[in-house]
Image (cartoon, helix red, strand yellow):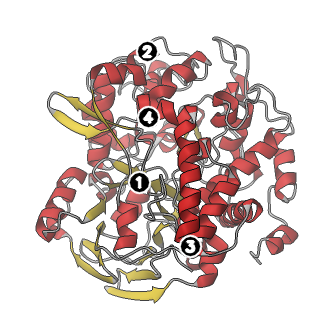
Amino acid sequence: MDGYAGKIVYADLGGGTVEIRPTPDDLKRQYLGGRGFGARIVADRVDPTIDPLSPASVFVLASGPLTGTGIPLGSRYEVSAKSPLNGTLASANSGGTFGWKIKKAGFDAAVISGRSEKPVYLFLNEGAAELRDASPYWGKDVYETTASLLADIGDPKAKVACIGPAGEKQSLLACIMNDDDRAAGRNGFGAVMGSKNLKAFVATGNLPIGVADQERLNAVKERIREKIQKNGICEALTKYGTSVLVNIVNENGILPTRNFQSGHFAGAEGISGERIAETILKKNAGCYACIVKCSRVCEIDGEVHEGPEYEPVWAFGADIGNDDIKLVTKASWECNRLGLDAIGTPGAIACAMEMREKGFIDEGPQFGEVEGLLDLVRQIGYREGFGAELADGSYRFAERHGHPELSMSVKKQDLPAYDPRGLQGHGLSYATSVRGGDHVYGYMIAPEVLGSPEKLDPYVSEGKAGWVKIFQDLTAAIDASGMCLFTSFALDAQDYADLVTATTGMAMDADALLRTGERIWNLQKVFNIGAGYTRADDTLPERLLTEPLQDLAPKGRVWEPGRLLDEYYALRGWDAEGVPTPEKLKELGLM
């Protein structure tokens, strides 16, 4: 079996010990890697009722078998833990070059437990691992930490994943950053690292990454390369980046505006991918082995960084009533510098703006008045001033001030950049996501807006439960494999199965791949039930159920759950309360 580095490092920060063990074959066969490894290891080691920021929490960083093999867009790694933001067993995905370098350093995963008495970082190098003192880097931001670590190590080929001030302050909006501007965002995993006094991971080395059948893999690689290069959505991502979606989503009347009070933003053109290309774009960039290169490297006033991506463009733009692309970009960069989630942070700001607008609070920012935006983001990162109130997300802020209904979140995690009142299937995907408000755990935008793999009527509920299940299971498998989700615009389940078979030597077809994703999904669901989640949590904010959109094609529409949830549960083999049945768990090998 190839495609794996063959080792997992277990670091007990409380005891200061590091142990290296072989990667178990049954873990590979049942869960592939990435999100699958993380979900299984956390579920095995963590009581669902623990405090996610306690020493008893376990944090897993894992690549996939396709990561770093040279397969186009095979670059991803996953971090998994019990989320401090909402208590789910969740994961966050990131690209760049760090996932590849983990494998070159000789590891499939790192499992972190306990809490160190002083700041440390985990150094991985060609099959060896050690905990090192990170005291000199504590207090530094992401850019400073990365530069300082690389300079001190003296290895320009090393790669860094770290937290910034937000993680150190244990903000529940804190994420983990690699390659300066790449984020494993959502769910507050930066706070988990901060709670453990773990400042960073550093990976280096040049160990080979073998494959089971190179000739077969080369043939599959060429097939998928051609499919990706001929795909219209991938072509648009190359030309305008992810922000190509701004005008498309706005024209469909589903671009959430002013904290989801509307689905249409008059200033959308000013923050679009086209406007970025015309004004601040310096060049395209991509992750390891990427042939799409959707990332934008931009320059403003002599400062150059990657980004912004579509989600922060929307969130620092339409959602707070701002059409200044330079300010949007600077706010996104500030989130990267501080190690803040660039969806949850502006989501909390938008929530505060509406509460100020309605007179529920008498201080804080207002829609469209964004002169102090960058300072407010900085305050959130450092838990200072008014930002300290927002540092744990919109739900806790709104609840504290008596209006939790104004948090546009599912399971306490802020929703991303698509209004589900005009997207019945995507609304179900939001409601049932096992990590809370989310789009990349089941991207129903593909069929309901972009027409991939076929165009579905976004206003129709019939048949959507089946689509959502397939997209969720496929995404879980893709996350486990180490591939970029954007490949799913061009590839199907059999393509991924063929890549896994050629790389690892494990026989797999489309059905087996989807079954792997289903196993991961159910494992996360069972953990969440243990953490206290019930059917009542599989829903959307009240506004999206009762306040119709007022513009363009979806005018007059709300999200209508109807029998969607019942149909979804039945298709999953769960009971009427959304609990996986013993028969389903046995079928998946989970009991």
Closer to the N terminus: mark 2 or mark 1? 2
What amino acid type should be assigned to the residue bearing mark 3? Answer: Asp
Given residues 413 and 500, the one toward you in this image is 500
Mark 3 and mark 2 in contact (Cβ < 8 Å)? no
Picture coordinates of residue 118 (x, y %)? 24, 75
Q: Which residue is mark 1?
A: 289
Label 3: which secondary element? loop
Q: Which label sits on residue 238?
A: 4
- Spatial separation of the CA atoms under disc 2 and disc 3: 48 Å
- Circle nearer the N terminus (4, 2): 4
Looking at the rendered structure, the secondary structure element under dot 1 is loop
Residue 188 has which mark? none
- Residue holding disc 2: 269
Query: Which quarter of the picture shows residue 590?
Result: bottom right
What is the three-letter code of the residue carrying label 2?
Glu
Q: Nearer the viewer, residue 246 or 216?
A: 216
Which quadrant, please, contains the N terminus?
Answer: bottom right
Indicate which disc, 2 or 3, sits on the residue closer to the N terminus.
Answer: 3
Separation of disc 4 and disc 1 at Cα?
14 Å
Q: Secondary structure at mark 4?
A: helix
Q: Nearer the viewer, mark 4 or mark 2?
A: 4
Observer-nearest of 304 and 544? 304
- Mark 3–mark 4 Cα distance, whole angstroms, equals 31 Å
Q: Indicate the amino acid at tag 4.
A: Thr
Q: Residue at x 45, y 74 (%)?
A: 109
Which quarter of the image is occupied by the C terminus?
bottom right
Task: Tell me the residue at 47%/52% (across/down).
Answer: 73
Q: Which mark is residue 213?
A: 3
Q: Relative to 298, does residue 95 appear above or below in the rendering?
A: below
